[in-house]
Image: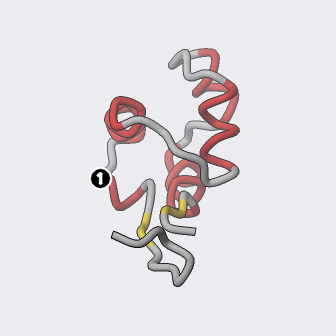
Amino acid sequence: MMIDYTPFWNTLEKSGENWYTLTSKHHMSHSTLHRLKHNKDISTKTLNDLCRILKCNVEDILRYIPSETDQTL
């Protein structure tokens, strides 16, 4: 795992927003939230939107975790 979205769920919990408001009020797709839940890739536009909605910084949404199984550069 390289990118971990655990900080997002903690930030979401503290924000007063939830899965329902992100989808209904802010029009985020269920598939985007599913991707976050399963540490899949999301776009930088989505990161920007989440930072604006949650009034937070990128590090409040994700963290980088080095892994021995990362691809060779």
Q: Quadrant of the C terminus?
A: bottom left
- Is 45 displayed left or right of 70 in the figure? left
| Residue 12 picture location, percent across and down | 55, 48
Residue located at (48% from left, 39% from top):
42
- Is 46 displayed left or right of 69 in the figure? left
Residue located at (32% from left, 53% from top):
58
| In this view, 6 is above or below 52 | below
| Closest to the observer, 18 or 68 | 68
Write down the residue under mark 1.
Answer: 57
Task: Name the outermost residue toward the bottom.
Answer: 68
| Closest to the observer, 27 or 39 | 39
| Residue 37 picture location, percent across and down | 68, 49
Residue located at (61% from left, 54% from top):
39
Residue located at (55% from left, 15% from top):
27
Label tally: 1
- Is 26 displayed left or right of 35 in the figure? left
| Residue 52 picture location, percent across and down | 32, 34
| Closest to the observer, 51 or 35 | 35
User: Dot 1, crowdedness within 10 Å: few (<14), some or many (≥20)?
Assistant: some
Q: Quadrant of the N terminus?
A: bottom right
**Kind of element beneath mark 1:** loop
The amino acid on which the numbered mark 1 sits, given as a three-letter code, is Asn
